[in-house]
């Protein structure tokens, strides 16, 4: 694993993973993919929540097109080995054991959007822009985007982005369901960290159920989904549930703030 292309730090119970090729706009080559996978595995072992961010002005410009160019003349057998290598990496994030928050700024393009879509929460800032320019590059999505990005956007919007090369602003991205928060320029990472630390306070089993089980329920039929929900509900019940329910009943737990009365809820 290359230490330089992906950074890893632990901030209390939060793992901070950084895409670190700012001069290449954090384009993802094979080293980055391998390093990301190692970082996600490590985070699952030692953190309760992960934050993924991009170093520099851009989150990620997608697949490293210069490296992809070198693959074009490879023999079919060699190319076969490169197929689907992003999938296990991003599945670790999207349906692994801990929730992930992605902090976005600047370009969140192609494979960059696919990576962001594997996070459970996406925090953009006002400089963020989203695009799927695969049509212009003569390639297809390869990081699970046809499943994950399409589920966020819906077919019509995904087809529009892929066919026309349309670029969305942060505000449009929020409207299109590509991010849940839009912060002032330069503040997405701080907000993502705040959210991550808040998430660490949840019962760990509930976090696991949201991170690992909800995406699978989302893939199931109505009937199977309800059955899975019943099983997950049973698995999530723990002594912590009893203590937390008791704390509420005994008025020891914080009440939820009324958004109409309180100001900032972060
Ligand atoms: C790259 C890449 C890259 C930048 N692969 N090297 N992604 C794209 O089609 C997006 C392509 N990138 C861009 O449109 C622009 O670079 C940005 C809008 C992201 C940023 O623009 P800018 O003016 O700040 O930077 P730049 O001058 O274009 O790029 C700076 C350097 O980064 C330059 O290298 P240099 O050696 O000439 O300095 C660029 O070549 C390099 N660079 N983006 C390689 N993507 C799993 S399948 C997913 C399929 C896809 O991801 S398709 C979408 C690919």
Image: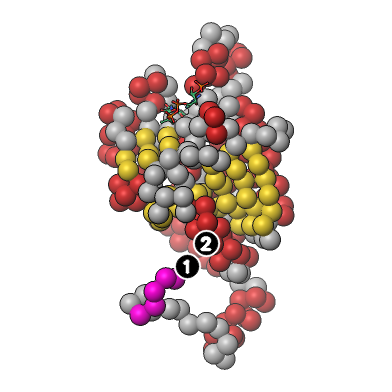
| Residue found 37% across the figure and 39% down from its top | 130
| Residue found 72% across the figure and 33% down from its top | 1
Q: Is residue 114 left or right of residue 136?
A: right
- Give how far across and how far down residue 189 sits, in percent: 52, 52
- Give how far across and how far down residue 20 sits, in percent: 60, 37
Majority secondary structure of magenta residues: loop
As for residue 97 lying within the magenta part, the answer is: no
Q: How far apart are marks 2 and 1 (CA)?
A: 7 Å
Q: Relative to residue 178, is residue 78 depicted above or below?
A: above
**The residue tagged with tag 1: helix, strand or loop?**
loop
Please name the residue that numbered disc 1 is placed on. Answer: 266
Disc sitting over residue 144 in the figure:
none
Looking at this view, is 153 or 31 the one in front? Answer: 31
Please name the residue that numbered disc 2 is placed on. Answer: 195
Looking at this view, is 60 or 91 the one in front? Answer: 60
- Give how far across and how far down residue 28 sits, in percent: 55, 30
Looking at this view, is 55 or 139 the one in front? Answer: 55
Per the rendered image, the range of residues in magenta is 261-266
- Work out whether residue 122 can be spotted: no
- Give how far across and how far down residue 46 sits, in percent: 72, 54
Q: Relative to residue 101, is residue 242 depicted above or below?
A: below
Q: Relative to residue 53, is residue 65 depicted above or below?
A: above
**The residue tagged with tag 2: helix, strand or loop?**
helix
Name which quarter of the figure residue 264 lies in. bottom left
| Residue found 49% across the figure and 21% down from its top | 65
Q: Is residue 113 left or right of residue 41?
A: left
Q: CB under 8 Å between callouts 2 and 1?
A: yes
Q: How many marks?
A: 2
- Work out whether residue 169 can be spotted: yes
Name which quarter of the figure residue 249 lies in. bottom right
């Amino acid at each position: 694993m290359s230490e330089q292309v992906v950074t890893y730090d632990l901030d209390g119970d939060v793992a901070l993973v950084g895409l670190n090729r700012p001069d290449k706009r954090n384009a993802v080559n094979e080293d980055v993919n391998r390093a990301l996978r190692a970082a996600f595995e490590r985070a699952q072992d030692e953190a309760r929540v992960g934050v993924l961010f991009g170093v520099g002005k851009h989150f990620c410009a997608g697949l490293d097109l210069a490296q992809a160019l070198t693959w074009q003349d490879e023999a079919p057998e060699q190319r076969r080995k490169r197929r689907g290598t992003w999938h296990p990496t991003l599945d670790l994030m999207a349906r692994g054991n801990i929730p992930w928050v992605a902090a976005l700024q600047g370009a969140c393009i192609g494979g960059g959007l696919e990576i962001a879509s594997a996070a459970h929460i996406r925090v953009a800032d006002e400089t963020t822009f989203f695009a799927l320019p695969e049509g212009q590059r003569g390639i297809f999505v390869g990081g699970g985007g046809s499943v994950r990005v399409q589920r966020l956007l819906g077919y019509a919007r995904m087809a529009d982005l892929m066919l026309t090369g349309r670029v969305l602003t942060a505000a449009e991205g929020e409207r299109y369901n590509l991010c849940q928060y839009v912060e002032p320029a330069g503040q997405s990472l701080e907000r993502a960290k705040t959210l991550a630390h808040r998430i660490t306070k949840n019962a760990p089993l509930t976090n696991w159920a949201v991170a690992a089980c909800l995406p699978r329920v989302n893939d199931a039929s109505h009937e199977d989904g309800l059955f899975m929900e019943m099983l997950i509900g049973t698995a999530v019940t723990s002594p912590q549930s009893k203590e937390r329910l008791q704390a509420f009943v005994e008025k020891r737990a914080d009440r939820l703030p009324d958004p109409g009365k309180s100001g900032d809820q972060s």
